[in-house]
Amino acid sequence: MKNPSLFFGTLILSFIILIGIIGPNLPFVDKDLTEHLYLKHEDGSMVMPPFPPSEDFLLGSDRQGVDLFSRLIIGTRETLLIIFSIVLIRMLVGILLGVGAFYSRFLKLVLNVWHQLFSYIPSIFLLVMIVGIPFFLYSPNRPFWFILVLALIEVGRVGDVIFKYVSEIASKPYYEAGIVAGGTPFNLTRRYLYPNMRTQMITLIANELGRTLFLIAQLGVVGIFISVTFENDASGAYYAVNTSDSWPLVLSTILKDMWGVKIIPFSAIFLISITILSFYLIGNGLVKKLDKK
């Protein structure tokens, strides 16, 4: 096997994507994510959730009595869509800013301000503050704003990395020769920047995918999800109810589950970890493949 990293990474990620596509239609998956208040045994005894692993609950259930295996399968598609959407937006804007900053003083100023503005506070703290603003909290388009905020909040960091890549390549003699030959910014980018930045960009994208998945997992721990609805209790007070099915939802009760039903958080942690691993393996494998050419 010439490139085991690329092979195993692609195999793992392909399987996860396949689960996201066909998983909800599998006969042993509860696509409705039915909540079971209790289970009644043949001897008349009742068991309250979370239920232990059994024939009906392969991995057991969560604290709402929902089949944990089904919840993870159903959440795969949403989780992948979230992280790929965030990274796609972040990379597109980051590339425009990073490359543009090399040719434009104004864009360089924008990039510096953007990077410095969000680089001194941990992303999770910023996100908690921003998504808690009423506009974002109550907007009917909350999922869109959630993804956009997560993408843009670290664009400055990505753009700064790309700007440094461009600056390093631009200091090479062949780039200077291209300028002397009358090359336009577009032609210089196409002929010199892109070919020499491919491996760095692949590594950057792989890191961003893993970083983003880890970040939304952290948000799940503190109970912040991409979509919520508001309901009122008997006293008339309103409270937020999560409507997201992504993997981080399973981590929302981790403080209780870590000392009791460990399979609940560990199942989500395992899926998140193996997905991040697949990103790393694919990125590493692609870099090795390109370096051989």
Image (tube, helix red, strand yellow):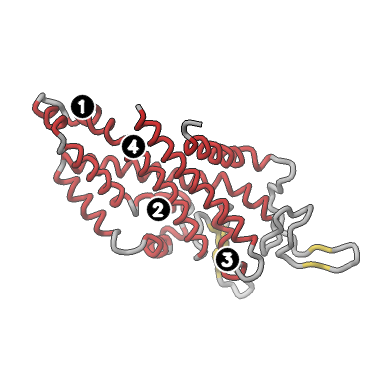
Q: Which residue is mark 4?
A: 199
Label 3, label 1: how far apart the Cα atoms are:
52 Å
Q: Which residue is mark 2?
A: 150
Query: Are the residues tagged 2 and 1 within 8 Å (C-beta)?
Result: no
Q: Earlier in the sequence, mark 3 or mark 1?
A: 1
Query: Are the residues tagged 2 and 3 within 8 Å (C-beta)?
Result: no
Q: Nearer the observer, disc 2 or disc 3?
A: 3
Q: Looking at the picture, how far across and down is residue 82, in whole percent?
A: 48, 47
For badge 3, the amino acid type reads Ile
Residue 260 against residue 192 in the figure, above or below: below
Label 4, label 2: how far apart the Cα atoms are:
25 Å
**Lateral position of residue 278 relative to residue 71, left or right:** left
On residue 187, the disc is 1
For badge 4, the amino acid type reads Thr
The reply to whether residue 63 is in sight is yes
**Lateral position of residue 106 relative to residue 203, left or right:** left
